[in-house]
Amino acid sequence: MLPDCAGLLVSGKCKLLRVSSCMGARCSYYQETNTLEKMMQRLRSLDEDTQERIPQKNYGGCRP
């Protein structure tokens, strides 16, 4: 059973590292595929003032 990792190829190998097989969640490069969606969901849950302040500081003024 392979993890739901963003670096996992269909063949079961890692596209980020030169390893023979996926190491799963213990890999230092392990990243869930839905991490971006979780970040966007978290931003949407914040109040409007905070939603305005974060893009000004981190995204050049544009909301992601």
Image: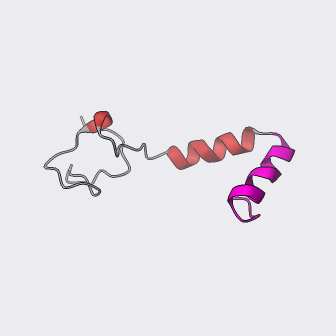
Res. 46 image quadrant: top right
In the image, what residue occupies the spot 42% across and 42% down? 32
- Considering only vertical position in the picture, is 39 above or below 15? above
Q: State the residue lying farthest toward the right.
A: 49
Res. 25 image quadrant: top left
Residue 34: horizontal and vertical position, in percent?
A: 49, 45
Residue 39: horizontal and vertical position, in percent?
A: 60, 45
- Residue 2 visible at all: no
Res. 26 image quadrant: top left
Nearest the eye: 62 or 13? 62
In the image, what residue occupies the spot 13% across and 49% down? 20
- Considering only vertical position in the picture, is 17 above or below 32? below
Residue 23 horizontal side relative to residue 58, left or right = left
Quarter that holds the N terminus? top left
Residue 37 horizontal side relative to residue 20, left or right = right
Where does the magenta region start and end?
47-64
Q: Is residue 22 magenta?
A: no
- Residue 46 visible at all: yes
Residue 44 horizontal side relative to residue 24, left or right = right
Residue 19: horizontal and vertical position, in percent?
A: 17, 50
Q: How many marks?
A: 0
Q: Is residue 54 magenta?
A: yes
- Considering only vertical position in the picture, is 59 above or below 50? below
- Considering only vertical position in the picture, is 40 above or below 58? above
